[in-house]
Image (cartoon, rainbow, N blue to C red):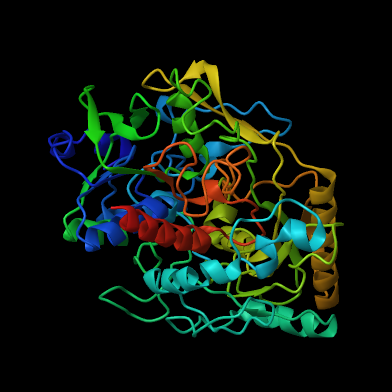
Amino acid sequence: MSDGAQRDDPATASVDRTPSPRADVCVVGAGPAGALVAAELSAAGYDVVVLDAGPRFNPDERPDRMERHLRPGDERPIWGMGGERDAYSSSGERSYPLNAARVKGVGGSTLHWQGMVMRLHEQDFELDSTVGMGADWPLDYEDLRPYYAAAERELQVSGASDNPFAPPRERPHPLPAFPPSYSDSLFAEACETLEIATHSVPNARNSEPVDGQSACVGYGTCKPVCPSGAKYEATRHVERAEADGARVLDRVPVQRLEHDAAGDRVTAAVYAAPDGEEYRQKAREFVVAAGGVETPRLLLLSASETYPDGLANSSGAVGRYFMDHLFAGVGGTLPEPTRQKHVGFNTTESHQFYDRPDDSRTAIKLEFLNYAGPAPADVALGADVFGDELLERVRGAYGNRVAMGALVEQLPRAENRIRLDPSRTDDHGNPVPDVVWSLDDRTRRTLERATEIQRAVLTEMGADVEWTVGPENTGPAYHHMGTTRMGTDPGTSVVNPRLRTHDLSNLTLAGSSVFVTGGAMNPTLTIAALALKAADHISERL
């Protein structure tokens, strides 16, 4: 069944999407942050309602989605993104391809993410204090450390705890690490010669069977779909929340949040059902966990007489300080087999160049890619030959590729932002998000430094370098961060260290939008840790 057909399926259309008469907590968004908050609060005995803009996806269709992804010439979106519902603008210095890597639906971005999960470094929380860049978080690593440990348990992280550059840990990772790949071994000798330390990558995928879930079986299509279900999806916590009594409604995009006459409390989330009706879900506490783009958009759409510039936006910071990670990479060929594409995720990386020695550059996380070069199907796509001749063509282009990647930090800048574009509307007549995005010179210098290191490694290996990404042809990692930043000053931030908005006493924002800086780590583990922290604070208020 196609995604469009799934949205119109009479079986799902008949689901009761009227408001719950009583709710302690209303959560907007069923991605990793919203799902964890819902699971925690439902387990504590609270009545929870979750509203998600997108559909539920049938897990039995994962193999079909994988086949669609692998089938040459099939350009249908794997997770149904696109069209009027998902329209956006990008008016900044650099075009931002927002729909290239986001999912609206129960499970959110974890339906198609790669699954790497690292803790931020200690320096990330005090960047201004230590090197005079960016800003400090209103909490430090020790404050978040117990929540990091809990998040690793919740996501069933596989890891070796062998990273000499990582912040201190309290216990090993829950599951054993995945062994280094064959191509990792090809990098090892060159890195040793260049005195570059390498270590394992913590992954939110099962290295062994656990809780009735499969271990990773190596399909290699982790991004955009894991057919085995071994990779963590937020649907696990959605199901746990439902088992504890939570109500999860799909295809109910929230149009706006309403507040009381004093402007102190949110009173209802107004959402649209597939039948065209609008409903108001009331609750004692509200949580918006819709990601770094849709969270500020919803607040801006909820402008009122009391909050003419957007809900919870007395600081003017809603939508500001949008950050992403930038990709740097170098790739080429070796005169020997590399077993490219045999593993769909990274098993080795290096944080040696992560912490900043001064304010000259930002953070760099080096990655040794296990998915360099084209897959056999990509090589065969559009070929005008068959049989032995096609086989020779595939052999000539596949099997000897090698590449390194890197995530590079982008510092928060007020001019990088998410705002509303009133000239273009979505399928409900609301202004679409406009992504205003640009790069600064420090980020460009860091991208150059990353590719310099990568080129040195490939040259030491004897590789024929064929391509480089960065700085000018860099692209985003689609990690949307920083648009409702955390802080202690209500004049410069949106939420406090307990993730509650400064302006409204019962509104919590959960997810990467509250990040003050983004570091260069994949953000999901920090998203999960902050969600668990937010759930604790909401429970205290209830």
Give whichever of 463, 171 is nearer the camera.
171
Seen at 31% across and 79% down, the residue is: 210
Image coordinates for residue 177, horizontal then vertical, percent: 50, 82
- Evaluate whether residue 356 shows in this view: yes
- Up-down: is 307 above or below 40? above
Give whichever of 243, 14 is nearer the camera.
243
- Up-down: is 405 above or below 313? below
Side (left or right) of 287 relative to 530: left
Seen at 70% across and 61% down, the residue is: 126
Seen at 32% across and 48% down, the residue is: 106
- Up-down: is 258 above or below 35? above
Please count the marks in the image: 0
- Up-down: is 107 above or below 233? above
Give whichever of 385, 155 is nearer the camera.
155
- Evaluate whether residue 345 shows in this view: no
Image coordinates for residue 35, horizontal then vertical, percent: 34, 54
Image coordinates for residue 234, horizontal then vertical, percent: 36, 57
Image coordinates for residue 318, horizontal then vertical, percent: 56, 35
Quarter of the image for residue 274 reads top left
Residue at the far front: name it: 262
Which quarter shows the N terminus? top left
